[in-house]
Each structure stands twice: as structure tokens, then as C-alpha cells.
Amino acid sequence: MTGITSPGRHRPRHRAARAASAAALALAGALSLGAAPAPAAAAPARPAADPLARYHHQQLHWKSCLLGPDDTTGKELEQAGAQCADVTVPLDYARPDGRTLTVAISRIRGTDTAHRVGALLLNSGGPGGPTLGDPPFVRRAMGQVAARYDVVGVDPRFVGRSTPLDCHWPTGSMIRGAGTDRAGFAHEVRFAADLARRCRTHAGDLLPHSSTRNTARDMDVIRAALGERRISYLGYSYGSYLGQVYATMFPGRVDRVVLDGVIDPARYGPRLLRGAEDANRHALRDWADWTAAHHTAYGLGRTRAAVLATVEAARSAAARTPLRVGDYRVDDHDLPVIVFNGLSQDNPTAYGDFAEGVRDLRRAAEGRTVAPSPWLASVLEFALTEHGSGYGSAQTSILCGDVAAPRDPETYWRDLRRAGDRLFAPVTRNINACAFWDPPRERPTTIRADLPALLVNATGDPRTTYPGARAVRRDWPSSRLVTLRDADQHAVYGVYGSRCVDATVNAYLATGRLPATDVGCPRPTS
């Protein structure tokens, strides 16, 4: 999201290698073991009264990550020398002797035991994004310093290979467009209420325990089960907020912290995307410039204005009559989300995927028979079928479980009318399922006043916008901000190809010393 994104497109390792075929939406809209080295420092003995003792001292059983011949993630982990384990955590931390959950983790052990730093836990965002498969990608980004860390991927509670939460939705995301009139908005109110009802029906026993605070508590159980006194952390997008919460709840248990795509905790919640309209308009204009320069390939217009007019024509056509795209019908609730989903990665592959998708939409608007391109087909499958229900259910349960949303539909309708934007505001300011959710069980975390962390953000990030990163930097004088200039990019380290950013992060991971001042990195020229 911003984190709020679709599963694939949001995950860093797929952003780098498979941005074209990643299958999901922005809610935005991201691992050979030798002999096991001893941990850098044994976990201190816990008092007998520790209510979580059986979780902290559990024995992890490491095994192959490969689930079967079609398990692509498992194959990548296997080839990288990773092993996997299941960590047992309590469903309800207030009742640790009650029902339990499984949290799936993967690990690639460091090989430089003489200079070992410790475990580096990962979160690629979402919320609700699986991260178990990310250690191979992260180790490649880390270069030589990777040998000094055990790199650990985690599928948070209710995500991926962990105990699932699935509301049996007809969509993979609660994020939709509001439509163009009051009747369309009324339809969205009913749709959002139905999503919430399905969650109460199918996962009502789990919803009260889905939150960032509980995910942070799970992380600390993982830390203890790994035998680590402290952990280092790399979090992308929503993972930056999770890192802030963990460091606040467990301040003595963090070592080196990197937050990439930084969320301002003051703005975190079910309406996190509200205010991202300008950044997305800027990203759309930059994409239109690139597409105009490639008119021969895509035929969408020879100027920025012509390309933007093509997008607007498709939007207007969908508002009049749903567009037929393959087996799907795309209306004014769907098309703005498709456009929004096309704008999180600033590279020719992602730009080309989006251009092909817009070309398909234009052809459909002209009444032609269209077989959607792979990127558009994956977006439509995610948005308009039950294929991504588990992802959207988990993502929504975390957002709604963290911060209460306004409950009166009129609040959203007035906001939409004030915004006056027909393309992005209908996505970023629309009502969603959290308006019909039960109140969170805990208050939002008051984030600690200062943290010596390394923050990373692109100036044109359309999900976690740059002002949010600057706000966190102001609140944390001990931190440093690494800025990638002139890029409309969500998630940078190891993803975008900036040697400046990657080298700065790796130097910090190697030494534990932050740069003396904030660092500005130019957009790579090639």
C-alpha cells in the first residue's frame, strides 16, 4: 500500500524480476546451509512467570521450502539454500494458553560466522503481502554484506503459508472506484458493507486478532525462537509502519533498521491513500511522456496530451457502458483502479505493461474484440474474481483492525465531491469495508519519538508519498533519509537499480553506522 498494492506488484523480488506479470492491485495500488553457526548472543534467560515462555523457547524444525513441483517460490528458495519452519504463536496474546496460529518463515544462514551481525527480518508490505519468498532477492541486493546475516522471510499471521484468513470475497481488494454519480457511490456503499459482512461470516473468530500490533508481537516470538537478543529489520511500504510499531513496542530488541517507502504514522489507517492524488497525477504524466515517445510501439498518441486523452476517453466510455475485455466487464468502478495499479514502478517494463493495458481498454471502448494483455488479465482476475480473496481479506483485516474508519457514508461522499477528480480521487477517497468493521481492540500505537533508522524514499513515489518520509525524518532526528530524486518509484533498495541507494543501505548494514547527513541519489541515467 503503499503499501496498498496487489500481491506480486508490491513484492520487491517480483518488482525487480517480474513487474510485467505481477498479478495484483494497488490498495493501493512489495530467500547451502552448512553447519549452523552459533547466534551472536544467546537470548537472556526469561523468568519462570513469562506467560509466553513456551513460545519463546520453542524448538524450530527446519525443512525444505518446496511444497511440490509447481511451487515456484519453493524452488527459488531451494536454489538459494533456504530452509523453512513454522513458528507457533498465540491467536490472542491476552490468552497465551488458548488457541494458537502458525507463522511460516524462511531463512538463509549467513556464511561469515566470524563477523556475524545477526538475523535480518523482512516485510515487503501490503499489508498482507507474503514475504517468505523474499530472502533470495534481498541477499542479491545486499551483496557481500549478506554473508554476515541470517536473512529471514516471514509470512505474517493470516498471510501466505501462515494460518489463513479468507472472507470468500468476489474480489482481491476492497479498493474500488466510487463511480461517477450518487447511484454509483450507493452501489459502492452496498459493496463495501457486503465485504465486511462476508468477513464476519467466514472469519469472525480471527478478525479481532488481526492487527499490526499482533504482527509485531509475532515478530518478537520469532526473534526469541531464533535465539536472537536483537534483530535487524528491512521493511518496504506498509512494512515501514510495521517496523515503527515493532521498534516502539520492543525498543531494546532492534539493531539496524531500514525502512523503504516510508509511511507517516500520523496518516496510517484505512484511508492511507487519501492525499496521494497529486503524486499519481505526476506519475501518470511521466508515463504519458514515455508512452508518447514510444507511439510506434503502442499507438496511444505522439504527445503527452494525446496519451492522456486516450486514458480519459477509455474512462468516459466505461462510465457510459461497461467495456468488454475478454471475459470481463470493466465499468467506472474498475477502470480508475486499473490506472492506479499501473503507476507504482518507474521502469520501461512496467511502463510498457501499462501501455499495453491502456491500448486494450481503448480498443474495447471502440467496440473491438479484445483479449487482454498478460498484465491487464492479471489485474482483472485479481479485481473481478475470487482469485485474490485471501490476499484482500488479510490486507483489509489488518487495516481495519489497526485504525477505525469513518462510519457515515456521507463523509466519503462529501470528500469525493470536494476533490473534483474523476480518475484518482474515486479510488483514494472512496468508502471501503472498514466503514462497516467492528472497532479495533487496541488503540493505534503511539510511535516512539526517535529511532536511529535509515529511511529510503523516491520523490515521486505514488504510494508512500515523499512528504510522509520527510515527516518521519523530522520526527526522528537520529535517523537519516536517502532520497532517490526524480523517480515515480515505490520501493527502491534492490529494486530500482540505484547504485547510490543500494551502496548507502549496504554500508549501513555492514557497519551499523548511519550516514553523517541525509543522502540524495540521482535518478540512474541508464
Image (tube, rainbow, N blue to C red):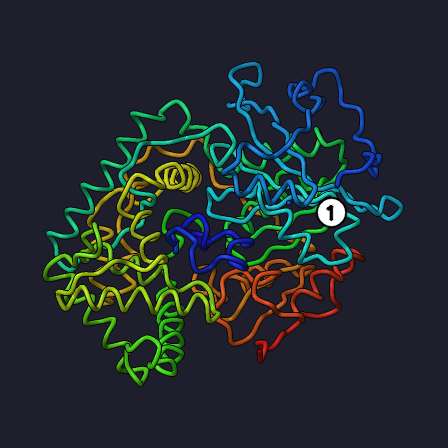
**Residue at (25, 67) in percent of width and height:** 421
Q: Position of residue 518 (x, y in %)?
A: 67, 70
Residue reaching furthest right? 114
Q: Residues within 10 Å of mark 1 (few under 14, many from 20)?
A: many
Q: Quadrant of the rendered structure where residue 419 is?
A: bottom left
Front-lying residue, 20 or 334: 20
**Residue at (80, 24) in percent of width and height:** 45
Quadrant housing the C terminus: bottom right
**Residue at (73, 43) in percent of width and height:** 150
User: What element does badge 1 sit on?
Assistant: strand
Could you tell me how many numbered marks the image carries?
1
Which residue in the structure is indicated by mark 1? 255
Q: Is residue 119 left or right of residue 124?
A: right
Q: Position of residue 180 (x, y in %)?
A: 15, 60
Residue reaching furthest bottom? 303
As drawn, 57 above or below 262: above
Front-lying residue, 242 or 17: 17
Front-lying residue, 54 or 318: 318
As drawn, 471 above or below 308: above
**Residue at (20, 55) in percent of width and height:** 330
As drawn, 141 above or below 215: below
Three-letter amino acid code at the position of disc 1: Asp
Front-lying residue, 445 or 299: 299
Q: Position of residue 140 (x, y in %)?
A: 67, 56
Q: Quadrant of the rendered structure where residue 364 is?
A: bottom left
Q: Position of residue 40 (x, y in %)?
A: 83, 39
As drawn, 185 above or below 526: above
